Amino acid sequence: MDSCSGSRIFDLIVVGGGVMGSSTAYQSAKRGYRTLLLEQFDFLHHRGSSHGESRTIRATYPEHYYSKMVMEAWRLWEEAESDAGFRVYTKTSQLDVGPADNKSLKAVASSCQKNSLPHLILNHEQLALKFSSRVSIPENWVAVSTELGGVIRPTKAVSMFQTLAFQKGALLRDNVEVIDIRRDEVRGGVRVYTSNGEEFLGRKCVVTAGAWAKKLVQKVCGLELPIQAVETPVSYWRIKPGHEEKYSIGGVDSFPTFASYGNPYIYGTPCLEFPGLIKIAIHGGCPCDPDNRPWRQGFQLDALKEWIDKRFQGIVDSSGSVLNQSCMYSMTPDEDFVIDFLGREFGQDVVVGGGFSGHGFKMAPIVGRMLVDLAFTGKTEGVELKYFKIGRFQENPKGNAKDYEDQVSFSLNPDGQLGCME
């Protein structure tokens, strides 16, 4: 490795070793770029958004631009799995349900049509027939069913990208906190400074620091990104004995990944990681400081218990979750990503990927590719970047205008009331 005045020189320095940063490092190293991946904590830590047992992959989105991204990400997941020689996701179908007049669900159906995504729209009787009465909806609800669903094993997936990046020549360093990024006025590119006194020189830099991106970017250049860290609970519920196979993934009668539109928005995955348990959670949580989290686990909302009881007709025990975990979202006001040049004195030398708002994991392969494209070519093909520009918040503090409901519920406390418990 070249050096200059004690600084190590790279084509690309990636700051943040979660799924987005690890995917970016893989894409960069795969193209032959000298790549450095820096992570402030241990690799595969549980303090951010890239750990845990499962993530849903689905192409059903109210926003048409995400559906196209997921379908391409699907191909890239398979490509990475082929490189690695093992699998990190398990295929199944995807089921979206909700009131027939729900704007978001209607937009999902429209997005499927716009993107030529094969789908079925089912009433309550058709749904019961298709899924052998394993799930039930009221007469005034509808369901959208597609074959493009599945479960990703997140920790295994991050490890896969890091392993592939390493195999292709990337240097990976954990427990190295980046404290500053400065433009190198003499050589061009950027200098990256760490808390242990190291200094690295890169032609380009990509910041994928998750919930810490806002703090780092503000410190580096004074720009305040509208990204709010949110602590979100994840809960597992017991399937009653004798019925476990009905809600498992895999096989001819594989149960789907699922989402329920309304207030609250509820999502879940089939029985996979823990025998006899099914993941069902509310897409929401409490704003937090990523460096001072309360580490709450499990919101036992009456609305969630009622939903479980009615949708699964008593086959899933709704009296209380049996296993609870905690994760973090990095929310933007419009729940859309931030993928853009940092600009200012850095021009196009620093690219930011953040604000993935609780639904980005599935798109990590394509996001990594986009970030490398932007860093080295200044553009990316096949994706409408206008939705992810930082400047959209200058035009409208709420970001992209949408004619349907927000998906994430904020400030839900353990007794089901609004407002977070201190």
Image (cartoon, grey):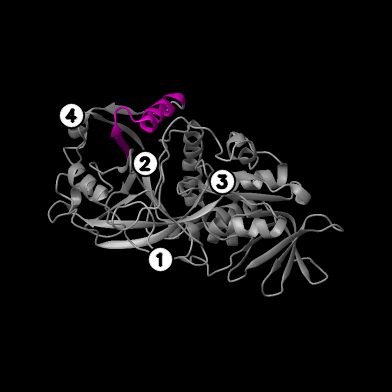
Q: If the image is split into quadrants, where does the N terminus sit? A: bottom right
Which mark is first along the chain, 1 or 4?
A: 4
| Residue at mark 2 to residue at mark 4: CA–CA distance | 22 Å
Q: Is residue 80 above or below residue 116?
A: below
Considering only order in the chain, which callout, 1 or 2, is on the residue closer to the N terminus?
A: 2
Q: Position of residue 287 (x, y in %)?
A: 46, 56
Magenta span has 110?
Answer: yes
Q: Which residue position holds label 3?
A: 367
Furthest-right residue in this view? 186
- Looking at the image, tell me whether mark 2 or mark 4 is earlier in sequence order: 4
User: Of the residues shown, which amino acid type is indicated by label 2?
Assistant: Gly
Residue 55 pos. (x, y %): 40, 51
Q: Nearer the viewer, residue 18 or 381?
A: 18
> Number of marks in the image?
4
| Residue type (three-letter) at the residue carrying disc 3 | Val
Query: Residue 95 falls in which quadrant of the image?
Result: top left
Q: Earlier in the sequence, mark 3 or mark 1?
A: 1
- Asked which secondary structure carries label 3, the reply is helix
Pointer 2 residue = 149
For marks 3 and 1, give the one nearer the viewer. 1
Residue 248 visible somewhere in the drawing: no
Q: Quadrant of the C terminus?
A: bottom left
Bounds of the magenta segment: 94-114
Q: Tell me the CA gap for discs 3 and 1.
A: 28 Å
Which dot marks residue 295? 1
